[in-house]
């Protein structure tokens, strides 16, 4: 996710942004920092998604925008034939390290979610957790997920919702660094309406379940330190602002944590809603 992709969920295509340039900026943002430090905390989401998909041993599973491999690892643990893809080689390297440590067999391949290098109907299950939702051309990415999934197969997604904590982090970043005109908000992937719009015509069923991931950190300052250092979009946002802008953004983010925090002490226990989606391909 590049900072410039952040828009309000209601944003529609009113202009023609340079999607190629936007994608290059996104790739640079995700390659900065070390997303794996944050990504590894989300492992439970991949495990839950595999259970909701009811995946079976021996199925061919494609993880799109896999990051450091949460769903790939979960599917491999269930004896699936897994291919993990991402357009950031450093993230795939982290996923490869994790697979080796757990002695799991996964194939890794650098790939763009909007132009997957696979034949039609190549996979039984296609998955993505907090990954494909950040593609600049949402409709193209959705069509690629559908194309590589066999008829009768399943597409499983976990996407942050607009009103949840991370959705509101996006909105806060957008206040300080407005996105270009015509760019859809990634958080639209966390709404049933947008999922129906992109997948409905080629789906025999779409199941959407609101779920919650809980961020747990020592303090709001600890959360800020980790995300500013390792989460590329925040790292790039702070780097793009002057000292006053950085202070204002930090203040807004700490206030946002305060709104969601249910720790009852000095720690951070922040629920963040996401939409879990299971699509059966027609």
Image (spheres, grey):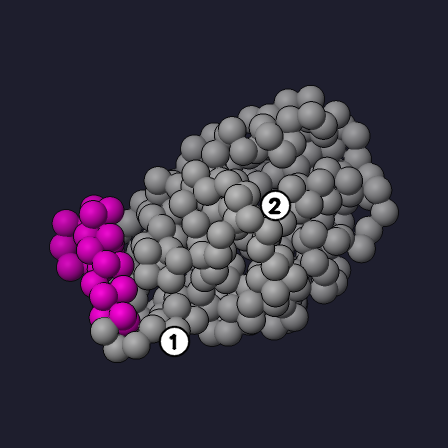
Residue 138, disc: 2
From the viewer's side, name the closer residue of 182 and 188.
182
Q: Which residues are magenta?
A: 245-268
From the viewer's side, name the closer residue of 19 and 73.
19
Q: Is residue 145 above or below residue 6?
A: above
Question: For residue 265: magenta?
Answer: yes
Q: Is residue 79 above or below residue 92?
A: above
Residue 239, disc: 1
| Residue at 56% over, 71% down | 28
Give SS at disc 1: helix
**Magenta: predominant secondary structure element?**
helix
Q: Is residue 236 above or below residue 155?
A: below
Q: Where residue 176 sits: x, y (%)?
A: 32, 61
Which residue is situated farthest in the front direction here?
15
From the viewer's side, name the closer residue of 97 and 22.
22
Residue 6, disc: none
Question: For residue 78: magenta?
Answer: no
- Number of other residues with Cα within 10 Å of mark 1, as a class: few under 14, some 14 to 19, many 20 or more: few
| Residue at 63% over, 49% down | 137
């Amino acid at each position: 996710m590049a900072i410039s992709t952040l828009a309000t969920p209601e944003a529609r295509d009113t202009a023609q942004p340079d999607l190629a340039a936007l994608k290059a900026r996104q790739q640079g943002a995700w390659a900065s920092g070390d997303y794996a430090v944050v990504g590894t905390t989300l492992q439970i989401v991949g495990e839950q998604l595999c259970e909701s998909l009811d995946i079976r041993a021996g199925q061919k599973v494609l993880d799109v925008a896999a990051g450091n491999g949460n769903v790939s690892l979960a599917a491999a643990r269930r004896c699936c034939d897994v291919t993990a893809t991402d357009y950031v080689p450093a993230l795939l390297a982290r996923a490869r390290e994790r697979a080796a440590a757990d002695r799991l067999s996964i194939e890794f391949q650098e790939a763009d979610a909007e132009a997957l290098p696979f034949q039609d109907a190549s996979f039984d299950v296609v998955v993505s957790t907090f990954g494909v939702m950040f593609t600049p051309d949402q409709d193209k990415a959705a069509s690629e997920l559908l194309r590589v999934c066999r008829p009768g197969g399943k597409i499983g997604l976990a996407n942050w919702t607009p009103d949840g904590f991370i959705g509101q982090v996006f909105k806060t970043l957008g206040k300080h660094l407005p996105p270009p005109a015509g760019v859809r908000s990634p958080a639209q992937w966390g709404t049933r309406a947008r999922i129906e719009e992109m997948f409905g015509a080629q789906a025999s069923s779409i199941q959407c379940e609101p779920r919650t991931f809980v961020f747990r950190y020592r303090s709001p300052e600890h959360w800020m330190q980790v995300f500013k250092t390792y989460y590329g979009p925040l790292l790039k946002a702070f780097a793009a602002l002057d000292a006053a802008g950085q202070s204002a953004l930090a203040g807004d983010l700490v206030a946002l944590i305060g709104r969601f925090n249910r720790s009852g002490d000095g720690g951070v226990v922040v629920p963040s809603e996401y939409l879990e989606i299971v699509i059966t391909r027609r």
